[in-house]
Image (cartoon, rainbow, N blue to C red):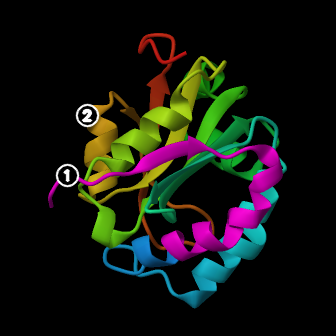
Amino acid sequence: MNELAFDVVHVPAGEVTALAGDVAAVYRAAFAEPPYRYGQTQVREFQQEVFARHVGREGFRLVVARVAGRVVGFAYGYTGQRGQWWTDVVAHAMPEAVARQWLGGHFEFVELAVAPEFQRCGIGTALHDALLQGLPHPRALLTALDAPTPALRLYGRKGWRVLVRGLKFPGSDSTYLILGLDLTQRGIR
């Protein structure tokens, strides 16, 4: 694809809810195709339950990419803590020493999505970097489908390392990786 003009911006807290529909539209488009194949049920759950719950979490931040004013990508995360569902599931999947080092007070990089027609244009990389820039957290963690996806290749290029392999979350048949990034070593903070 030719060079594409896009902007990546941090969304102020007061404007996040107004963009929920745009975020859900990108989510729907990005995860409709293999290997994800998310349908309306997953999109509705993401928009009405998951994203809505995450917006209220400590340290929540959202970045969006726009092309000609249209939201074509997003990334978000928040401060992960013990007692939160994801953190507790992941803690049980890793050795105790690794859990002590990585979990609690980490930045949970929850989602990165780019509409298919805008993928492989540098938008995912720009969203990734913008979301992590300036974080006070010493570590970041994320979940990635254990499949050869563009996102997994991006994370590898950015220095994320595999902390857990073969994780199956309750209620899911898919296999996931848990990746960690030491932000103190990357000059991102």
Q: Residue at x 65, y 28 (%)?
A: 106
The x, y position of residue 186, in whole percent, is 41, 15
User: SS class of the residue under badge 1?
Assistant: loop
The x, y position of residue 103, in whole percent, is 65, 29
Q: Residue at x 44, y 33 (%)?
A: 129
The numbered mark, 1 or 2, whose residue comes first in the sequence reads 1
Residue bounds of the magenta highlight? 1-27
Label placed on residue 31? none
Q: Quadrant of the C terminus?
A: top right
The amino acid type, in three-letter code, at marker 1 is: Glu
- Name the residue that disc number 1 marks: 3
Q: Residue at x 67, y 46 (%)?
A: 11
Instruction: List the single residue furthest toward the bottom.
Output: 40
Can see residue 164? no
* Image side of residue 82 versus residue 11, left or right: right
- Name the residue that disc number 2 marks: 157
The x, y position of residue 175, in whole percent, is 41, 62
- Front position in the image: 41 or 22: 22
Q: Is residue 82 magenta?
A: no
- Front position in the image: 87 or 107: 107
Can see residue 126? yes
The amino acid type, in three-letter code, at marker 2 is: Arg
